[in-house]
Amino acid sequence: MEKFTTLSGIAAPMDMMNVDTDQIIPKLHLRTIKRTGLGKVVFDELRFNADGSEKPDFVLNREPYRRASILVAGDNFGCGSSREHAPWALLDFGIRCIIATSFADIFYNNCFKNGILPVTVGKDDWRLLLNDAANPKSPGLTVDLEALKITRPNGDPITFEIDGFRRDCLLNGLDDIGLTLQKADKIDAFETVQREQQPWLYAPAPRNKERRCDEPANPVR
């Protein structure tokens, strides 16, 4: 997972409450387990008409927000079903940070596991950041995870809080697999001892006896 330290980029304003995961990535596009290629359909039904043409009023279809890496979103962002495709699609589009007053719990947790920083701020600070993002001439924000600070276009800072463990994981680019691999030496040592003491656990599984096609699977005896 890519490390997150400091991000400076275009912030897109999305003043919508209760944006759910089906709006972020409609169920039609959940037929893949690949994390790439979903950016083109993120917010599919909000971005595109039925014929595939863009809806000009949607923020990510306008300049300079086509190149946004930060999203200033409304209350309860990411509610709905627990599909991990939602952060996959946002990340593939280029979104690395989402700022909102509140998030749905499962979506919030999934963001950290995929290298996206979800930042929770108070209502007053959120309005300032939303107004900053809504100015297409200077929509840039800088998010510093080490300093726990967002720097506005005018230079004013807004601080935020985040769980220390999650912060360290993002700073070091550690997802669940990365955290496990940090203990690889201990895992190897355990398996070495277990292999010596319980070798049958590592023996190849016996092959099932082949049966004729006319033989019942569970013959009555």
Image (cartoon, grey):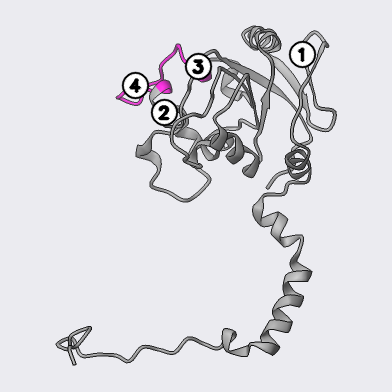
What's the residue at 69%, 15% (across, down)?
A: 122
Q: Mark 4 = which residue?
A: 49
Name which quarter of the figure residue 159 lies in.
top right
The secondary element bearing badge 2 is classed as helix
What's the residue at 46%, 51% (across, down)?
A: 33
Q: Mark 2 = which residue?
A: 44
Name which quarter of the figure residue 49 lies in.
top left
Mark 3, other Cα within 10 Å: few <14 / some 14–19 / many ≥20: some
Q: Mark 1 = which residue?
A: 152
Q: Which residues are magenta?
A: 46-60
Q: Earlier in the sequence, mark 4 or mark 1?
A: 4
The image shows residue 71 at horizontal and vertical percentages of 61, 22
The image shows residue 12 at horizontal and vertical percentages of 60, 18
The secondary element bearing badge 1 is classed as loop
The image shows residue 182 at horizontal and vertical percentages of 76, 60
How far apart marks 4 and 3 lie (CA) works out to: 22 Å
How far apart marks 4 and 1 lie (CA) works out to: 34 Å
* Membership of 58 in magenta stretch: yes
Q: Mark 3 = which residue?
A: 17
What's the residue at 55%, 88% (across, down)?
A: 203
The amino acid type found where label 4 is placed reads: Asn
